[in-house]
Image: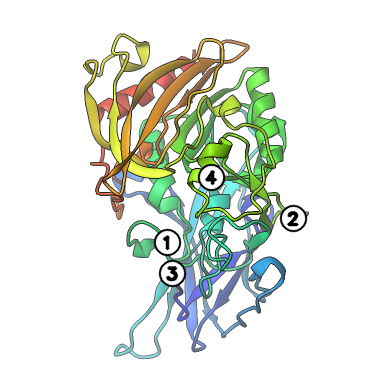
Amino acid sequence: FRTPAIEGYCSRQSVKAGETLDIMVSTEPAARFKLEIFRMGFYGGRGARMMTTIGPMQGKTQPIPPVGKNRLRQCQWEPSASIKIPKAWPSGVYLGRLNTLPNHKEEPYWQSYVIFIVRDDRPADFLFQCSDNTWQAYNKWPENHSLYTDPRGAHAVDVAVSFDRPYAKYSQIFEHPLSNGSGEFLLWEFPLAYWMEQHGYDVTYCSNSDCLDADQITRCKTFLSVGHDEYWDVRQYHTVKKAITKGTHVMWLCGNSVFAVSPFSKNKRVITRDGIFSGLTDKEINDAIGVFTNDWRRRGPDESDIIGARSIVPFNGGGDWTCTKPEHWIYQGTGMKKGESIRGLVGWEHHGAPAEKPGLEVVAEGTVWRGGKQPAHWTATLYPGPKKNLIFNAATIWWPQGLSNPPGHILPWSHYSRPHGPDSRVQQITRNIFAQTLQ
C-alpha cells in the first residue's frame, strides 16, 4: 500500500490564499528530495500547471504511528516544509510531487504525491466539492488500516481514520499507481475538473470539511458532488438541504453518495464511521448483512430527500446508462432515442429507489449487474427545488469518465463492465443541465 522511499501528507485538507500549509514528508532511507507543486486543470490539454518548486531538502525517516482507539493510525510527523499560499494562486486542486534526489546517476529516484485544495470565498457559478472524506475512508496506509478492514466487518461502526497520514495506493477495483499520495482525485474527480476548465466554466473548489456551513454553498449558484462521495458528516446533509431550500442547484454527478455517517473530530482531521443514513430498508440491510455487523445503526436522515434517489442493494455492479425520456430538455442535441444506452457508464456503485418528491422525474434507468449475474435497478432523477432550482442525480460514480480523458487518466473497470471514456452524449447532457443552472 505504501511508497516508503518517499511519502507525505498535508496539515489541512483545504487552505485559503494567505494561509500557511505544512507538508510532512518521510524518506526511508533518509534522502534528499524536492517538492514540485502543480495546480490541476486543463491548461491547453497538459492537465496541470507548475506553480512552484521547493527544495532540495534533506529528508528523514519519520515514525509509523501505533494503532490507537477505533483502529486509528494518526501520524505526528515533523513538518518538512511550509508554504504560505500566494494570493495569486486560484482556487483549485493542487498536487505536490515528491521526488527523491539520488546522490549518483546510477541510483534510482522515487516519486509520490501530496494533495490539497485551495479554496476561496468568492461567489461563483459552480462549487466543486472534492470527495476527500471517501478518499480517506478507503485509505489503507500504513498496514491495511482503512474504515473497511476492521476484523468485525467491512461496515463496522466506531472505526476511525485520520487525514494525518499519507494516502496509500488506491486499493479497490483496479490498479492505479498515480493514486500514491493523491487520494482518489485523479480517478474520479479530475475528468470533470479538466472538462469544466477546458470549457471556461466559472468554478471554485472545496473539500468535504468546508461544507459544514450553508454560506459556503449558497455563495455559488450550483453545488457539485462528484465521483464517490459516500462519507458525510450529518451537518453536511443539513447544510445542503438548507442550500436547496434557499435556491441552490445541486448536481449529484456521483454514486453511493451520502451513505455513511462519519462525523468530523473537532479539528476536522479525523472521521469516524458512526452508522449509515436512513435510506436503506431493513430488508436491504438484512440481505446485505454480511457487509454490515449486527450492531449496525441508522444515524442520519434519508439521503434520497436531497439526492432524489439513494444507494440500494446490491450496492455495486456495472451497466449501461439508458435514456427513458428522449423528449426531455436534458437530451436536447444528443440525438438519443428511448431505450438507447451509453455503454458501461453506470458503475461501480449507483443510486436507485427514487424518492417520492413533487415533480421528480426519472430521466434514465436500467439494470446493473453485480459480478455479471445479480441485477439491481438504478435510476437517474431530476426534481425541482422550492425556488425553481434543479437537483439532478446522474446515479453513477462514473459520470465524469464520459466527459474527458486527461493526461495519465486510466479508465476503471469492475463487475465485467467499464465506461468507455469521453462520450458526446454525456458531454451534451452535462452542458444542457449546466446551462439551465446559469439562466
51 and 190: which one is in front?
190
C-alpha distance separating marks 4 and 3: 41 Å
Amino acid type at mark 4: Asn
Decide if residue 240 is on the left or right side of residue 130: right
x, y percent for residue 47:
35, 49
Local packing at callout 1 (Cα closer than 10 Å; few below 14, some 14-19, many 20+) is many
Look at discs 2 and 3 and give the one toward the viewer: 2
Q: Which disc, if any, is residue 389?
A: none
Q: Is residue 356 above or below residue 181?
A: above
Q: Which residue is mark 3?
A: 112
Local secondary structure at mark 3: strand
Q: Which residue is mark 2?
A: 265
Amino acid type at mark 3: Ser
Local secondary structure at mark 4: helix
Look at discs 3 and 1 and give the one toward the viewer: 1
Q: Which residue is mark 4?
A: 286
Look at discs 1 and 4 and give the one toward the viewer: 4
x, y percent for residue 199:
36, 31
Q: Earlier in the sequence, mark 1 or mark 4?
A: 1
Q: Which disc, if any, is residue 170?
A: 1
Local secondary structure at mark 1: loop
Residue 40 visible to the viewer: yes
